[in-house]
């Protein structure tokens, strides 16, 4: 044919491109690129209620389908948001949000909600994101047509979608499933449950598709004639800096921290917060509440709840996060080290977060995570396990900073830093431990007469009464600490008091000072040896720390020496 | 009569003064001042065996008497030393020496030998000074004549004199007693036992008299016609400086000092001395061997033995000196406080002695005692009890020096000084504890890169990654100590690490640092308050020392805070 003409039902409109119609004729030239566009005023009332105008007329129907989510993040599932199929960060961004259903609605026979495929309580739906399938079309789909929801293999590990009444549509081991078509103008509610936090292998994005499938005749797969899709982002796990308002304070009760507990209780009650005590049966003597867990939260426009991150440290407190903290609207997440050694750096005293900061114009309104690691150039040393580091980096919203904490015996960043709120500047101050400031305090005390004046006074008396010169006196490096007593302040040796030695001829038994090690040797021992060995004296450093030093005595206090009488006869004194 | 003449037995010689004899006559003018001196060639063989030539002839006898002691201090009782009746210090001095018989010859039912009036063992005589009564005269004294030994009332408290066989002659409650006269040329041995050490009311000198008494007729007291006397000086209690050769080392065994004991044993055995352990049944947990007792000795030309001075401290070790140390040739002396309070300054870690010194030309060849007391101008404060101080001063030979030790909690001079032998100069060095030297060591370590460089590195990272200025950072005065571990050296906070705090809004729960007290306030707390309170922060210092700090953690490590979520929504981040 070289030309064609068109006839159709009154509610069907058409348009032909290119618009090349023979003047005054009702026929169109049939060119290779001619396109006929058919539209209808309203959706179909029954299947195939209209005829398509064409060279070979066919039955057609119309149907409006929209898989809707809260893509504008206002807590309400709006209609057919044009941006629902993609995800964009920022206040002008878009895309729906999903929570990992990591709390436990049940307190009896507790498991993570995300670990059971059923929904066991209606309240669990609150932890999920609503998704609505809006359809408007004929009472029934034409024979062979159907709606299906489908997800990718990868996504099936991260999400589950439920429809009433708690029937899983897609999710684990179920990539695609037919979705009921109810006919007319209807809304079908779905509940989307996040299963996994963003991590190294998962960016947190989840795509859910809905397709209308057309039968293709025997032996051929059904063909999607229409597909809608929505994209969710799983909420990251977010840490809370010191500048956020406290809710509850957690401490352990042990057999020896009664008065500490009392002090903490007083402080917490004064502040009006809640004190939660982890008792002995649970902590089994492990008092390091900071180290076994880190509190954070997950957040979405419709719901928010705290989530405890359980450390792979797994001390005797290891059951506490799961057994005592996990519950309704209190989530739980953990990471287990696989082929890595867990070290003290995995304790969460080594995991902190800064208050909000802006760095070179880039803002971190949730602050930045701070962890401690081995020195960057170190070939050995302890580190935070990679699984935990990967988890923290994957949350993206609190871009971590790695500090060097392996220089500490315990190795936690909270040993040398913390943040406190402040009214001015950045609304906080970073507090750093400073040996230099420490020295300055002690030096200034000394300069102001609180130093070794007592010993100086005695030194003068001894010089005078024993006829000594300065060369007869050797000053051993010993610090004294002033303690307050009922009747004023008095001093005790700060570390084992090396002068309190036992002298056995040229052999000296000296309290082991446990000073700073330099090149593997105690700097205090080295100093004392350098002072005494040139005199032919032999120094043996004796560990008296626990049984003597801590009880305010040393080697000399704990010993006595019977000596030979003097060869000088007392009666030969010239008195 | 105006003249007289003389006739006598052949062995009697005479001389008359003034020598005014009538020329060629054998008669002498009888003037009012004429004196007839009669001498004999030999002592009498029987009483009244010669006639005295006189106007009225009478019977006379002769007798040599000498009460002898070792007045030249060579260990042998010489004959009739012209200086035996007085006492003089020095190599050119003279006078006998007496020991306090303060040991115990018996080990069963032990008492001080000086506390029993009997001599229970022959060996006890070695602790006494020999005294010999040498007589040469007639076989018997004329009727009515007798020899008596006598001492003063005061002396009777300080001495006992025994004659064979263990019969007390004079002493307690016995001021005078007849001494047997054996006739001819005889020696009678006495044993003199000292009972008391020199003290405030006793200069150590003891005088013993021997008299020949002449009868004076009925109703009249006997008259001494001849008296001899000897003077003893009691040996002072003498301390032994560190420069004297050790004999035995004493330590306590407690339930927690096993490895300390092992170290001491190794040292003592290496030196070749003897280790004496005071076991738990005796020390009852009191490990302060230095404090309960001080070893010294007493010395005489004939004998010397160690003497333990038992402190009025009387800790749980109080029975040890008497029960375990006192024995044959190991003396014991103690002083009890009467109306004084016994303080820590009475422990003998607060009683030391210097090596021999010479001060402004005055020599102290036995050294000088050193004790610690309250500051001279202090109106209150602890002191060594007066009874002990009196005792020490009264020994005279180691003139004490009082130092100021009350500034120390424990208050012992051995906390800040000791003496060690040296090959040169005064043959010793005085070692003094020196905070200044301590600061210098730590400062130099810091300057050489062993200081807070790790924190500085982290500070730089934090400044860069959080966009902080120096004004955003507050340096808290905290010292770190480097401990050696298997894999190199690592640091721990030296005192409670104040940065490891709990932040509850503007309320801070800070580890109590137990720093030096100045004007009754902890200087570290004061410093930290001055840094934080201007920011509106409230500091509560919490004592976490025993249950946390000592286990290498602090308040923050031992707590956890659940906080509200950030008001900032994570999806509004511009990533």
Image (cartoon, coloured by chain):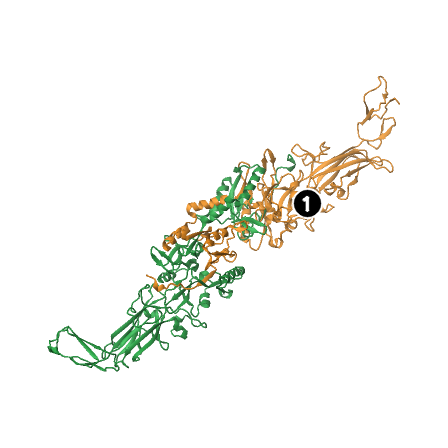
Chain colours: A orange, B green
Query: Residue A399, can we see it?
Result: yes
Assess disc 1: are there few (<14), some (14-19) or many (≥20) residues with their C-alpha within 10 Å of its C-alpha. Answer: many
Q: Secondary structure at mark 1?
A: loop
**Image side of residue B143 versus residue A55, left or right:** left
Residue A228 percent location from the top left of the image: 76, 34
Q: Nearer the viewer, residue B87 or B166?
A: B87
Query: Residue A488, can we see it?
Result: no
Q: Can you say which quadrant of the picture contains the C terminus of chain B? A: top right
**Image side of residue A379 versus residue B445, left or right:** right
Displayed quadrant of residue A371: top right
Residue A466 percent location from the top left of the image: 37, 55
Chain bearing mark 1: A
Q: Can you say which quadrant of the picture contains the N terminus of chain B? A: bottom left
Residue at the extreme right: A1
Q: Nearer the viewer, residue B472 or A218?
A: B472
**Image side of residue B141 versus residue A176, left or right:** left
Residue B355 percent location from the top left of the image: 40, 58
Residue A54 percent location from the top left of the image: 86, 26
Q: Residue tagged by mark 1?
A: A102
Q: Nearer the viewer, residue B247 or A537?
A: A537
């Amino acid at each position: 044919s070289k030309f064609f003409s068109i006839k159709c039902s009154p509610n069907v409109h058409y348009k032909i491109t290119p618009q090349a119609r023979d003047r005054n004729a009702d026929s169109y030239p049939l060119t290779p690129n001619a396109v006929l566009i058919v539209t209808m005023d309203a959706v179909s009332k029954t299947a195939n209620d209209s005829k398509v105008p064409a060279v070979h007329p066919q039955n057609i129907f119309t149907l409006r389908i929209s898989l809707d989510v809260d893509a504008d993040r206002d807590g309400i599932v709006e209609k057919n948001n044009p941006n629902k199929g993609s995800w964009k960060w920022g206040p002008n961004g878009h895309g729906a949000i999903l929570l990992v259903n990591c709390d436990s609605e049940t307190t009896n026979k507790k498991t993570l909600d995300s670990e059971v495929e059923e929904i066991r309580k209606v309240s669990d739906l609150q932890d999920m994101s609503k998704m609505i399938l809006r359809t408007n079309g004929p009472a029934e789909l034409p024979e062979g047509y159907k709606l299906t929801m489908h997800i990718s293999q990868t996504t099936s590990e991260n999400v589950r979608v439920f429809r009433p009444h708690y029937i899983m549509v897609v999710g684990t081991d179920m990539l695609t499933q037919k979705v009921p078509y109810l006919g007319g103008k209807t809304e079908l509610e779905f509940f989307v449950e996040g299963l996994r936090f963003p991590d190294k292998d998962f960016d947190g994005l989840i795509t859910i598709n809905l397709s209308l499938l057309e039968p293709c005749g025997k032996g051929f797969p059904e063909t999607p004639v229409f597909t809608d899709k929505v994209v969710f982002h799983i909420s990251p796990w977010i840490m809370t800096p010191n500048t956020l308002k406290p809710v509850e304070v957690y401490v352990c009760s042990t057999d020896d921290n009664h008065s500490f507990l009392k002090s903490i209780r007083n402080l917490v009650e004064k502040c009006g917060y809640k004190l939660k005590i982890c008792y002995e049966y649970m902590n089994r003597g492990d008092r390091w509440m900071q180290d076994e867990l880190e509190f954070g939260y997950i957040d979405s426009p419709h719901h928010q709840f705290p989530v405890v991150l359980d450390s792979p440290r797994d001390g005797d407190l290891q059951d506490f996060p799961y057994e005592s903290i996990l519950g309704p609207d209190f989530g739980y997440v953990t990471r287990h080290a696989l082929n890595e050694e867990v070290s003290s750096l995995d304790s969460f005293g080594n995991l902190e977060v800064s208050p909000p900061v802006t760095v070179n114009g880039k803002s971190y309104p949730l602050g930045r995570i701070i962890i401690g690691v081995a020195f960057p150039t170190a070939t050995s040393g302890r580190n935070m396990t990679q699984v935990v580091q990967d988890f923290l980096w994957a949350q993206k919203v609190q871009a971590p900073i790695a500090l060097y904490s392996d220089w500490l015996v315990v190795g936690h960043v909270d040993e040398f830093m913390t943040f406190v709120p402040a009214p001015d500047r950045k609304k906080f101050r970073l507090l750093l431990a400073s040996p230099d400031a420490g020295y300055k305090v002690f030096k200034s005390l000394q300069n102001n007469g609180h130093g070794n004046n007592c010993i100086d006074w005695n030194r003068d008396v001894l010089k005078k009464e024993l006829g000594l010169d300065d060369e007869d006196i050797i000053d051993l490096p010993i610090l004294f600490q002033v303690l307050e007593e009922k009747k004023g302040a008095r001093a005790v040796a700060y570390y084992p008091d090396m002068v309190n030695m036992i002298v056995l001829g040229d052999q000296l038994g000296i309290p082991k000072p446990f000073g700073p090690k330099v090149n593997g040797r105690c700097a205090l021992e080295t100093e004392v040896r350098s002072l005494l060995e040139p005199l032919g004296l032999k120094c043996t450093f004796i560990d008296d720390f626990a049984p003597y030093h801590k009880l305010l005595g040393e080697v000399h206090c704990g010993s006595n020496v019977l000596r030979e009488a003097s060869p000088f006869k007392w009666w030969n004194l010239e008195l």
